Amino acid sequence: MTLLAETLKKIKPLDASSMALARTRQDNLTKPTGALGRLEDLSIQLAGILGKERPQVTRKAVIVMAADHGVAAEGTSAYPQEVTVQMLANIAEGGAAIDVLSRQFGVKVIAVDIGVNGDTSAFKNVTHKKVALGTRSMSKGPAMTSEETLKAVETGIELVNAEFKKGLDIVGTGEMGIGNTTASAAICAVMTGKTVAEVTGRGTGVDDKGLKHKIEIIEKAIALNKPQAANALDVLAKVGGLEIAGLAGVMLGAAANRIPVMVDGYISGAAALIAAGICPQSKDFMIAGHVSVEPGHKYCLNHLGLQPLVNLNMRLGEGTGGVIGMSLCESACRILNEMTTFAEAGVSNKE
């Protein structure tokens, strides 16, 4: 049995008993019922995921997958492909936005080379899990082989399993890779049924001409490869990316280990579509940190039934929106655990 198959067997429904107990406590805290809105709902979901009436998410990590896309050679990005290597080095050295926010909120950053088209072997603070030197151009054929796709997904599972053994309460998804909004738009269009034009944005900042070209390339790739929406691994192999595959694995591994997974922006949203396509139950373990400016992201979240915690007009990736979402998860748990009930405080409750 493959690691993926073993992982899928472990994914179970949320713990209804823990959720009911958390709801009861929320309703008896010293506040009007429902006064803290999404923070209350979030604490109850976390109770169900973690199987604890009083959940805690103090041990936090974000897994940042880096990979390149062959389709970038078709001129779909405003930045050259070598930026992936350079930015991975920056993340590893602690100078990227994800590093700054992670330091602020006490989140461990795990930077992973899962498919960078370059030599990163000398980079310190990088986990080296390279499956291939990037993908092939999906406009000329499948982006990955089925073997590469499975290996990348299982790499994500392995990373989560390893962190879980060390102690992990919540995990975030992040990525870095020139060309990855192109792959994400292709996945989004296939999995949600929206048109390519509806789900394709400017990514790194292409102009109007560049956006039109990007849409044409994605349409060509879908027409050529004919990815089947009912088979998420088929979609992933034909028009996806190595980091998207790895993040889908992170999400499935998190669900199997009963860990909440904080979904970041558009690329993470595309990975979530794949994970949910492989195992619909995994959606229950997902929390959307934010909604990206990239137009396709809202369609990803709508399709998954996920409501973003914040909208800050962000489109950076790296896991930045997810880490901000983690701080809200911790706040939700602290409210549930540390706030007193009416009985404990000796405050008169409503009759």
Image (cartoon, rainbow, N blue to C red):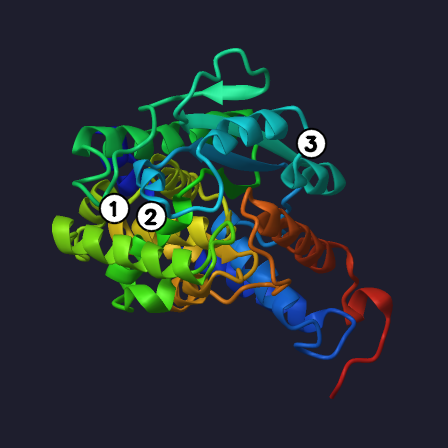
The amino acid at mark 1 is Val
Front residue of 326 and 56? 326
Q: In which quarter of the image is residue 246?
A: top left
Q: In this view, does 196 lie above or below 279?
A: below
Query: Which element is circle 2 on?
Result: helix
Q: Distance between the residues labelled 2 and 1?
A: 6 Å
User: Which disc number belongs to residue 126?
Assistant: none
Mark 1 crowdedness (10 Å alpha carbons): few <14, some 14-19, many ≥20: many
First along the sequence among labels 2 and 3: 3
Query: Which element is circle 3 on?
Result: loop
Cβ–Cβ under 8 Å for marks 2 and 1: yes
Q: Quadrant of the N terminus?
A: top left
The amino acid at mark 2 is Ala
Q: Mark 2 points at which residue?
A: 183
Q: State the image coordinates of residue 105 (x, y, percent, origin top left).
A: 72, 43
The amino acid at mark 3 is Gly
Front residue of 270 and 330? 270
Residue at 46 percent of width and 36 percent of height: 80
User: Which disc number belongs to residue 95?
Assistant: 3
